Image (cartoon, rainbow, N blue to C red):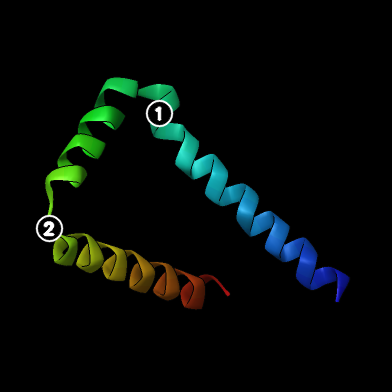
Amino acid sequence: MAKLWDNIGLALALVLIAEGLLPFTAPRLWRQVFMKLSRMRDGQVRFMGLMLLLLGLVLLLLIG
């Protein structure tokens, strides 16, 4: 069970690193991306979320 929590912690750490890269390296671009996202319809945002989830699952299957 401890290995499961270690893996979850590692995954969370990697997500936080990935999420922090753009605002750290290009804050203006990061702000522009969020401005564009805020103007999108809910369905468009959901579709993007679905595509990201599917991409993550495919990567997980390929790596794991």
Residue 43 position in % (x across, y down): 16, 67
41 or 12: which is nearer to us?
Answer: 41
How dense is the environment of label 2, judged by Cα within 10 Å: few (below 14), some, or many (20 and up)? few
How dense is the environment of label 1, judged by Cα within 10 Å: few (below 14), some, or many (20 and up)? few
Residue 39 horizontal side relative to residue 46, left or right: left
> In percent of the image, x 69 and y 55: which residue is there?
10
46 or 63: which is nearer to us?
Answer: 46
Q: Which structural element holds mark 1?
A: helix
Real-space CA distance between mark 2 and mark 1, rounded to the nearest whole angstrom: 23 Å
Q: Is residue 22 above or below residue 47?
A: above
> In percent of the image, x 72 and y 64: which residue is there?
7
Q: Is residue 14 above or below residue 62?
A: above
Residue 25 horizontal side relative to residue 32, left or right: right
> In percent of the image, x 20 and y 44: which residue is there?
38
Q: How many marks?
A: 2
Residue corresponding to mark 1: 23
Q: Earlier in the sequence, mark 2 or mark 1?
A: 1
Q: Are marks 2 and 1 in contact (CB under 8 Å)?
A: no
Using the rendered view, name the quadrant where residue 26 is placed.
top left
Q: Which mark is residue 41?
A: 2
Q: Give the amino acid type for the residue marked by disc 1 in the picture.
A: Pro
Q: Give the amino acid type for the residue marked by disc 2 in the picture.
A: Arg
Comparing marks 2 and 1, which lies closer to the viewer? 2
Name the residue furthest right. Answer: 2
Using the rendered view, name the quadrant where residue 36 is placed.
top left
